Amino acid sequence: MSIYPQKSKAQTTHLVLVILVTLCMTSPLLADDPITAIKGGDLYTITSGIIKNGTILIKEGKISRIGQNIEIPQKSKVIDARGKIVMPGLVAATARVGMTGSGGKIADSLDPFHYHASLALASGITSVFVSSGGTNAVVKPTYGDLDNMLLKVSVSQSASISGWMGKTTFVQNLRKARDYLQKLDEYTRKKDQKKLQELKKPSGIDMYIRLLKKELPARFRARTAAEMLDLVELIDEFGMRVIIEGATEAWIVAEEIAKHDIRLIITPRDKRRPNELISAPSGSTLENAAILKKAGVKFAIVPTSPSFATWGIAGRDLMALPMEAAFAVSGGLDEQTALESITINAAEIIGVADRVGSLQVGKDADIIILDGHPFHHKTLVESTLINGKIFYEKSKSPYFSHITHDN
């Protein structure tokens, strides 16, 4: 006979429940994911104005709450942003960076340890459009974290109508694709199985089919008004979605661009001499962005050199992306649209506005904290978060920790 008192079945069940509850409360695998709070800064939401002395709560890499007087849960990691500006990470609508290899699939050639990732983070850039070997993607500079670099693949289709042959070939292939789709639709509606079986898809038209179906926008490079009007003709005939990079003389044909809902990627400081042999307007102007905004054109802004450089002329590469937008302001563009051009509008043009580009509940917590106004030339990025994780702190940076406003 045992000398110890025997526990009843009810007592045993109660003890087991207590142990399970204790394990649930203490086990890191079962506990709630930790919350990060950014507190006290002026929140430039981009899409819903500025929230003074606001708070952002981040959970599982997403923005879960945003506003004023938000209660911060206990045990949250708190980032003090008092006196700072907090805004969405910047979006580079075009970039030539070393974070991807050349050729093959971009997803197979990502380099999370390239120094361009460090420079992007220090510049406040959290998403970049890259292309390589005929493919493209939007990537995040998550230094040291390969798994979270790739945001989206195949966001547009690069195309060209440069020269007579280039335009002829492009148009011919579009017409082949259109003819094929029309026959496919006709035979399907008539349930003509014999003709459906006989219908052969011409080789090399898959890309053009996607363009005609508007699954992807076609992305062209064009600087002159004449080149852009050529693209307007293509839209009139084929109804494609179009993005134009360059668009130096877009101000001349702004109304046509707006009418055809063409999206642009422009550089305010781009220079082109007027054509003195014609009487019509030509050449570049710093007012390009302001004129386009007035016409209702949506655009993103990129610098002269869409890369990161530690040499050459300062202020002309991606490290000075806000400065390029500030030049558009000096040309008459309002500050709000200038901010949109390097955040939400850029994100929309490259197809990722559902994830990044603004401070909104449910979006990726890609956030930067600045020590001044985004367009002030002395403003520095203090912290950069991607998916709610701090990837850059100026105070710990080997490149920028020594830089102050007095330097």
Image (tube, rainbow, N blue to C red):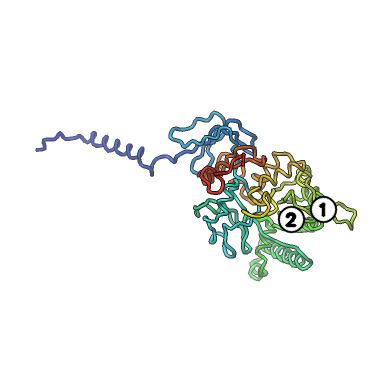
Instruction: Please state, as top left, top right, bottom left or bottom right, where the C terminus lies in the image.
Output: top right
Mark 2, Cα crowd under 10 Å, few <14 / some 14-19 / many 20+, is: some
Q: Which residue is mark 1?
A: 283
Q: Residue at x 64, y 45 (%)?
A: 343
**Place of residue 398 in the rendered image (x, y in percent of width and height, measured from the top left):** 53, 48
Q: Amino acid at mark 2?
A: Gly
Task: Tell whether 61 sits left or right of 325.
Answer: left
Quarter assignment of residue 23: top left
Q: Residue at x 45, y 39 (%)?
A: 34
Q: Nearer the viewer, residue 272 or 16?
A: 272
Task: Tell whether 274 sits left or right of 390.
Answer: right
- Looking at the picture, does residue 169 appear above or below residue 32? below
Secondary structure category for the residue under label 1:
loop
Q: Residue furthest front?
A: 407
Q: Nearer the viewer, residue 277 or 35?
A: 277
Mark 1, Cα crowd under 10 Å, few <14 / some 14-19 / many 20+, is: some
Badge 1 or badge 2: first in the primary sequence:
2
On the question of residue 207 being in view, the answer is yes
Q: Nearer the viewer, residue 190 or 283?
A: 283
Q: Which residue is mark 2?
A: 239
**Place of residue 252 in the rendered image (x, y in percent of width and height, measured from the top left):** 82, 50
**Place of residue 72 in the rendered image (x, y in percent of width and height, measured from the top left):** 49, 32
Q: Amino acid at mark 1?
A: Gly
Q: Residue furthest left?
A: 1
Secondary structure category for the residue under label 2:
loop
**Place of residue 242 in the rendered image (x, y in percent of width and height, measured from the top left):** 72, 54
- Looking at the picture, does residue 177 appear above or below residue 49? below
Alpha carbon separation for disc pair 1 and 2: 28 Å
